[in-house]
Amino acid sequence: MKPVMFLSPLMIAALVSACAESGANYAPVLDGEPTAAYAHDLRACQALAANQRQFDRQTAGSAALGAGVGALAGAADENVSESEGIAAGLVVGALVGAAAGAGDASDRRESIVVECLRGRGHRVVG
């Protein structure tokens, strides 16, 4: 097994786990001074966003879809052997899919923090 093939699942797993906190740590801009309850509410809203594990599963699904598409594209590459093309396409596709899914998960977690704070009466502008 080539080292790249062994490392790619580890890189994808690291990316997915790192994304669990991405977006959840967002501290939005307020219109005016924060209230006395803001710090407590912010921590609670960030915890709520971090606990949305379905986003991690969706990111993993994006990585798997990217791997499949990449493998198909790699198999069609006439400049390398079929197995090398599939392997390279699989790795690149998985990383691109995971990155795209991670970006989406981060955005969704930020939105949860913003809406949670608004629901608690804070004047969040973004």
Image (cartoon, grey):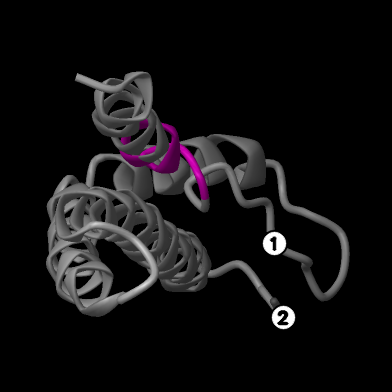
Residue 86 vs residue 101, the one in the foreground:
86
Q: Is residue 125 above or below residue 17?
A: below
Q: Quadrant of the N terminus?
A: top left
Tell whether label 1 touches label 2 (CB within 8 Å): yes
Residue at 46% in and 71% down: 111
Which of pointers 2 and 1 lies earlier in the amino acid sequence? 1
The spot of residue 26 in percent (x, y) is 61, 51
The spot of residue 116 in percent (x, y) is 41, 64
Looking at the rendered structure, the secondary structure element under dot 2 is: loop
Q: Is residue 124 magenta?
A: no
- The residue beneath circle 1 is 28
Q: Which mark is residue 113?
A: none
Q: Is residue 58 above or below residue 26?
A: below
> Which amino acid does the dot numbered 1 rest on?
Pro
Identify the image quadrant of residue 97. bottom left
Residue at 46% in and 44% down: 46
* Residue at far right of view: 32
